[in-house]
Amino acid sequence: MKGKTPAAIASSLLVLSASVLTACSAAIPGQGSLPGGSQIASGSGFEESGDLLGEYADAVKNFPAALPEGIQFPARLPDNFVTPGAHVEEGVASSAAYFYWLCAWEKEYLDANSAGDEQKLDSSLATLEKWEAFPFYLEHFDDPDGAWHKAVLAPAESGDPSGIARDFAPACSFYEQFNS
């Protein structure tokens, strides 16, 4: 994943996750079990798909930063986020909250750019710079050379919105589903 933007990684992971989860949910013989009949142990790093909404709600409730004015986290996960009855890795639902936040601020920046609103441009860009400092980003992205910053934020710092637009387009369908 080295050198890819978080949006590109998220897009790839969502497609891969949907494929794998669909295949796995069909292969799992019974609730609480894995292929071969082994049971999912507590603390195994996997959870029932029904637990995702609770994980997501906790992530939203404890989110470390605000969304743009007038934007709220959705009360539910995106349509077709996971196949009912599937087992998914813990943290998947929390990642949806983090990417929703990123998409909300990227959209705020892009809208401010279209409107020529310098104040919102500056404030949304300053807020987007928090992304790289989130523990979520630091724990899940290998970006020691600052590739995301170089590809996405550096052009914006010079007045060019193309990096943010490229980052937003492939990874923000969840955001757009609730804010179109």
Image (cartoon, rainbow, N blue to C red):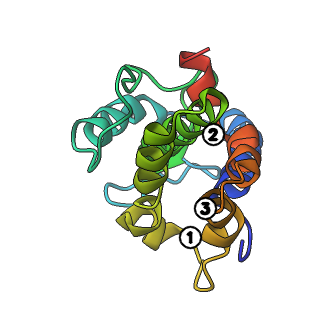
Write down the residue under mark 1: 141
Which label was assigned to residue 153? 3
Front disc: 1 or 2: 1
What residue is drawn where x is 55% and y is 17%?
A: 179
Per the image, the residue denoted by label 2 is: 28
Lower sequence index among marks 3 and 2: 2
- The answer to whether 12 is drawn above or below residue 141 in the figure is above
Badges 1 and 2: C-beta atoms under 8 Å apart? no
Q: Is residue 91 left or right of residue 20?
A: left
Q: Secondary structure at mark 1?
A: loop
Residue type at tag 2: Ile
Q: Amino acid at mark 3?
A: Leu
Which residue is the extreme one toward the bottom? 144
Residue 26 % position (x, y): 71, 33
Between 113 and 4, the one lying in front of the other is 113
**Secondary element type, mark 2:** loop
Percent across and percent down for residue 72 are 36, 24
- On-image quarter of the C terminus: top right
Which residue is more in the foreground, 160 or 149?
A: 160
Position of residue 165 in the picture relative to residue 36 (left or right): right
The front one of 42 and 45 is 45
Q: Please tell me whether mark 3 or mark 2 is closer to you in this view.
A: 3
